[in-house]
Amino acid sequence: MKTYTAEEVAQHNSASDCWIIVEGKVFDVTKFLDDHPGGKKVLAKMAGKDATKKFQSFHNDAIMQRVGLPMQIGIVSPTPKL
């Protein structure tokens, strides 16, 4: 699985190129935007960002396993502690 920095994910911040981070995993949700039950805008607003808190407030692990995992493209590299 490829590793990305948060900065790399942040570059994918539009409806035509929409990546999000959930629980340290990177997802390309671009093709899922129109199918998202909560609407396209919900995901597009989180494009390029860590959506973990938003995701957890609406979804459970079963949703991630069934819907999310096929869209996972990598993980986020840990931020070094100073």
Image (spheres, rainbow, N blue to C red):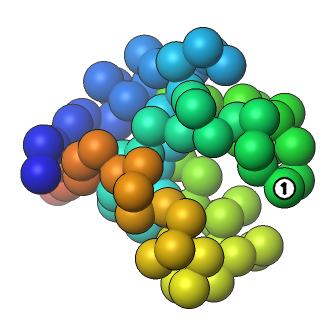
> Is residue 46 something one can see in this rendering?
no
> In the picture, residue 60 is in which quadrant?
bottom right
Relative to 55, say whether 2 is above or below: above
How many tags in the picture?
1
Q: Nearer the viewer, residue 74 or 80?
A: 74
Q: Amino acid at mark 1?
A: Pro
Element carrying mark 1: loop
Q: Residue 54 is drawn in which quadrant?
A: bottom right
Q: Which residue is mark 1?
A: 37
Residue 42 picture location, percent across and down? 81, 42
Residue at x-position 54% and y-position 39%: 29
Crowdedness near tag 1: few (<14), some (14–19) or many (≥20) residues, C-alpha within 10 Å = few
Residue at 52% across / 18% down in the picture? Answer: 17
Residue 7, percent across and down? 33, 26
Give me the residue at 63% from left, 40% from top. Answer: 32
Residue 47 visible? The answer is: yes
Image vertical order of residue 18 relative to residue 16, above or below: below
Quarter of the image where one finds residue 4: top left
In the visual, does 10 lie left or right of 39? left
Residue placed most toward the observer, 43 or 70: 70
Residue at 67% x, 19% y: name it. Answer: 15
Give the x, y percent position of residue 22: 48, 59
Q: Left or right: 32 with respect to 41?
A: left
